[in-house]
Structures are given as structure tokens and as C-alpha cells.
């Protein structure tokens, strides 16, 4: 596509843009983001914010185990306290509502709500009931993810996602949750980012449970997707009024040169990051190119699995962060070739809004049955500091504007995108990077748990107020 999303707003580097952007978050008059039914919200996840890991009968999760192993998480951080949201949820909901955010995407900690025998843990369940009821009282649309990586450790002890039985245990968990919480959830997502659970958890070991084997990754992915597929009809039966879907992180891979080998490398990158998940969900088969990249890693698939996995979705959640420039590795794969002189975030990730637009418009062409889309995560980490009670997160403001412009362009190109969630509502436990990386639009001082609204959140609030006030 000729139009460059960055050009719609600005292409200023963070240093140059400081100050000048601070008051200009508002989208152009012809932006689809002015539509009142375009949902704007923020997202979090249980292990990243809740803390209270030993309270009210919560069982250990794989992230409690993993983060306790020296060297696995930066600075030895763990989610034991995190943002203490388990105790501060009321103030956090007030804060969300005061920002005028219309939607909140949260996840349920499986080990908090079910014991090892599959019986409900009432205290844990009550926490989510209180939270969801309060959100509904505030008029906030609720998106609930059932699995955002905190697998109960007792299931990992029996093989975790390498064990097919875990998919059936997940369906039991989905059954309990949807029976208990029906009426308070507007949209259920079965899984968050199965790519991360399968590849980072079982393929390269950067995430819990820390195993590193490509064959494990493909089998774990199959069981994750099977879990999703088994849960969908259960959610439909128990809570017919809500929407049901799944959330995938997607990656843009661009070739380092025009050579056929580099083009192929970029294609394989996107197969590994996108088609590995989207093909089974939307086409009912795994992309064969994946097994060119990882020969001999075909998962064990039983009769009927692919039909279960590819049942229709009400929505697809898309999480997007950056692109990766790749070249051929000289064999059957790709290698990263980081570009020089490009804008990057605290994570080192390249800021590349066009990737979001191009992937979305590409998916529309590739998948004739592409469901309505919500951008369920987008945002960036920066080393934000509180100065005189304020946080000027200028790069984030620019980042969000440019990515929202990319969303607007994709909508105008015909992609059905219904909402956008900022990642994240507040700074939190960024997995293997601990608390150093700050993704929030609200700053958290972890020594006092004080929340400070960042400038980006103020500007989102201003825009939402303007939009509401419009006739
Ligand atoms: O913090 C994570 C989140 O849990 C899943 N998506 C990516 C975010 C940033 O890394």
C-alpha cells in the first residue's frame, strides 16, 4: 500500500517530537476512530498485575516456578506482588473509569479459581465476580482471556501443553468460568498469544516452563489450539450472549534484500509467526512451509482435531508490536538482520506502524473467513520517570497515534476492526524482563504502589471525552 501510516501524523524521532506532540493526540476529522462504536480500552493480564500468589487458595503457576529460578527473569523479579491489583482492584477500576476507557481486557488466573481436582475455589472466583460486576456497573465493556500463560504448576507436572489431557482440563476450566461468570463478560478469549506459550515456553525456553525443542513447540501449539477448539462450544452453551474468540500476536517480517532467498526468509518468518496459528484456526490445516523451516516437527494430530480447532470465531484478537528484518540463514530458515538508524523502544523493538496495517490487509486477502478483529494489544515500553508528579511519555504518544492511524487505514481498506486496547493499563511484570520495562499508560512506583497517570493516558482521555461530546 502506497500510503505510509507514519506520514499521516508525523515521522519525528522521539527526541525531536518532545513537546510538540504533547497536545495533539486527536485523530484527523476523517478518521474512523471517531466512530462511537469503535471500542477504545486498555488491557492487562493476571500474573502481570495481581500479586497475592499465595492468597485465598491460589495454587502455584508455571510462572511462580520459572521466575524463582535464578537467571530466568531480569533482576530476579517475580510476580509475587506485581501491582498488588488483587488488593487494589477497586482503586484500579476507579482509575480506568476516570480515564473514560470504554473497554477493559483482563485475564483470569486459572490456578486461582480451580483446585488440582478441578473443583472451584470460591474465594478466587469471588475476586473475579466482584471485579467484573464493578466493571459492568461502570459501563465498561469486559474482555476476559482465560489463559494468559499462568498454567497451574500441577498440570505442568503432568506434561503441561505437551500432554493432550491439558486441552481437556482447559475445557473443564472454561466450563466452570463461563457458568460462574456468564452475564458479566462481553467477550471471551480462550488463549492469549499461543505463539508465545508454544514457542517461547517450549521451543526456545525464554518463558515458562523453559523447554527448548522445536518438536515440543509444535506439539504444544497443537494442544493449545485444541484446548481453544474444545472450549469454544462450551463457552457458547454456557454464555450465549457473549462474543467468543482467541488472541494471536502477529509479526511482520521484511526481507533484507530483493534476493529470492531473502524474500523466502521473510515469508518463512511470517509463516512461523502468523500462519502457524491463523491457518489452523481459519483454514483447518497447518502451513506445510512450517515443516520446511523445522523439518520433522509435525505434531501428532488425531482425527477430528482440525475441525474442532477451526470452528467459526466471533472475533479474532490481534496483538502487534514491531517488525523484524530478516535474511536467509543460508539453509532452510531465516536470521534477524537488525536495521540501523530506525526508531526503537525500550525493548529494542522497531517502531513500525505500517506492519500492522499491512498484516491486517494481507490477512483479509488470505483468509476469506477472517472474523471481525479487535486489536487486543498494542503499545510500547519506555523508561518513564515521574517528575513533579507527571510522566511525559512522548514517544508513547507518538507511537499510539501512528498505530491508530495504521488501524484507521486498514479499516478504510476494508478490514472489519471493531476496537483497540492499549497495552497496558499500567506498568507491570514484563515476563522475562521483570519490572524494568514499562508498558503502562499509568506509571507504577513498585516501592509504594502509587499510580501516576502518564501524559499518554491523559490525551486518550481527552480524545474520548471529545468523541463522546460529539453529536
Ligand atoms: O506484556 C506482554 C503481554 O503479556 C503479551 N503481549 C506482549 C506484551 C509485551 O511484551
Image (cartoon, rainbow, N blue to C red):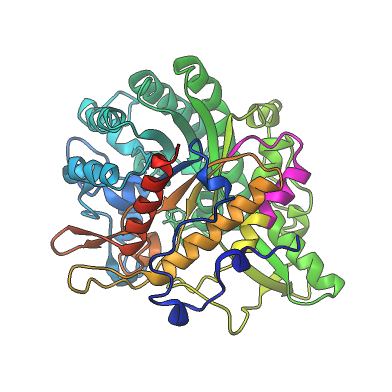
Residue 268 percent location from the top left of the image: 74, 60
Query: In the displayed structure, does residue 367 sit left or right of residue 187?
Result: right
Outermost residue, front side: 471
- Residue at the image position 29 percent from the left and 45 percent from the top: 96
Q: Nearer the viewer, residue 414 or 334?
A: 414
The answer to which quarter of the image holds residue 372 is: top right
- Residue at the image position 31 percent from the left and 38 percent from the top: 111
- Residue 369 is one of the magenta-drawn residues: yes
Q: Is residue 227 visible?
A: no
- Residue 276 is one of the magenta-drawn residues: no
Q: Nearer the viewer, residue 160 or 336?
A: 336
Indicate which quadrant contains ligand 1: bottom left
Q: Nearer the viewer, residue 75 or 259?
A: 259
- Measured along the vertical axis of the image, is residue 21 above or below residue 183? below
Which region of the structure is painted magenta? 358-373
- Residue at the image position 48 percent from the left and 38 percent from the top: 36
The answer to which quarter of the image holds residue 435 is: bottom left
Query: In the displayed structure, does residue 463 sit left or right of residue 200?
Result: left
Residue 117 percent location from the top left of the image: 33, 26
Outermost residue, right side: 260
Image quadrant holding the C terminus, namely top left
- Measured along the vertical axis of the image, is residue 24 above or below residue 195? below
Outermost residue, left side: 448
Q: Is residue 464 visible?
A: yes
Residue 379 percent location from the top left of the image: 45, 59
Q: Nearer the viewer, residue 14 or 233?
A: 14
Residue 8 percent location from the top left of the image: 60, 64
Amino acid at each position: 500500500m502506497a500510503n505510509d501510516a507514519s506520514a499521516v501524523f508525523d515521522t519525528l524521532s522521539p527526541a525531536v517530537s518532545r513537546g510538540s506532540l504533547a497536545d495533539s493526540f486527536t485523530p484527523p476529522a476523517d478518521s474512523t476512530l471517531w466512530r462511537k462504536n469503535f471500542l477504545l480500552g486498555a488491557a492487562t493480564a493476571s500474573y502481570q498485575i495481581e500479586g497475592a500468589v499465595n492468597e485465598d487458595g491460589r495454587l502455584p503457576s508455571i510462572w511462580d516456578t520459572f521466575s524463582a529460578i535464578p537467571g530466568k527473569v531480569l533482576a530476579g523479579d517475580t510476580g509475587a506482588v506485581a501491582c498488588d491489583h488483587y488488593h487494589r482492584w477497586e482503586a484500579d477500576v476507579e482509575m480506568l473509569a476516570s480515564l473514560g476507557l470504554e473497554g477493559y481486557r483482563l485475564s483470569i488466573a486459572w490456578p486461582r479459581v480451580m483446585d488440582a481436582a478441578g473443583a472451584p475455589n470460591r474465594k478466587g472466583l469471588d475476586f473475579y465476580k466482584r471485579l467484573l460486576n464493578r466493571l459492568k456497573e461502570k459501563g465498561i465493556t469486559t474482555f476476559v482471556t482465560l489463559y494468559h500463560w499462568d498454567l497451574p504448576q500441577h498440570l505442568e507436572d503432568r506434561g503441561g501443553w505437551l500432554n493432550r489431557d491439558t486441552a481437556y482440563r482447559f475445557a473443564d476450566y472454561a466450563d466452570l468460568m463461563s457458568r460462574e461468570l456468564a452475564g458479566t463478560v462481553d467477550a471471551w478469549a480462550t488463549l492469549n498469544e499461543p505463539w508465545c506459550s508454544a514457542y517461547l515456553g517450549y521451543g526456545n525456553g525464554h518463558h515458562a516452563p523453559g523447554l527448548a525443542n522445536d518438536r515440543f513447540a509444535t506439539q504444544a501449539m497443537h494442544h493449545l489450539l485444541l484446548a481453544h477448539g474444545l472450549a469454544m462450544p462450551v463457552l457458547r452453551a454456557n454464555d450465549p450472549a457473549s462474543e467468543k474468540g482467541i488472541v494471536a500476536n502477529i509479526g511482520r517480517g521484511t526481507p533484507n534484500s530483493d534476493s529470492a532467498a531473502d524474500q523466502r526468509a521473510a515469508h518463512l518468518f511470517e509463516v512461523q509467526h502468523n500462519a502457524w496459528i491463523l491457518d489452523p484456526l481459519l483454514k483447518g490445516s497447518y502451513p506445510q512451509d512450517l515443516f520446511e523451516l523445522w523439518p520433522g516437527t509435525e505434531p501428532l494430530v488425531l482425527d477430528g482435531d482440525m475441525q474442532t480447532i477451526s470452528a467459526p470465531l466471533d472475533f479474532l484478537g490481534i496483538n502487534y508490536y514491531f517488525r523484524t528484518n530478516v535474511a536467509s540463514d543460508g539453509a532452510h530458515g531465516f536470521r534477524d538482520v537488525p536495521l540501523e538508524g530506525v526508531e526503537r523502544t525500550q525493548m529494542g523493538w522497531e517502531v513500525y506502524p505500517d506492519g500492522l496495517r499491512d498484516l491486517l490487509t494481507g490477512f483479509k486477502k488470505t483468509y476469506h473467513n477472517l472474523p471481525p478483529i479487535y486489536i487486543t494489544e498494542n503499545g510500547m515500553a519506555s523508561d518513564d520517570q515521574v517528575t513533579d508528579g507527571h510522566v511525559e511519555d512522548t514517544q508513547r504518544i507518538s507511537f499510539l497515534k501512528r498505530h491508530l492511524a495504521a488501524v484507521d487505514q486498514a479499516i478504510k481498506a476494508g478490514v472489519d476492526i471493531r476496537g483497540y486496547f492499549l497495552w497496558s493499563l499500567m506498568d507491570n511484570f514484563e515476563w522475562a524482563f521483570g519490572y524494568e520495562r514499562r508498558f503502562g499508560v499509568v506509571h507504577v512506583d513498585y516501592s509504594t504502589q502509587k499510580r501516576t497517570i502518564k501524559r499518554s493516558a491523559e490525551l486518550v482521555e481527552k480524545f474520548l471525552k471529545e468523541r463522546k461530546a460529539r453529536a
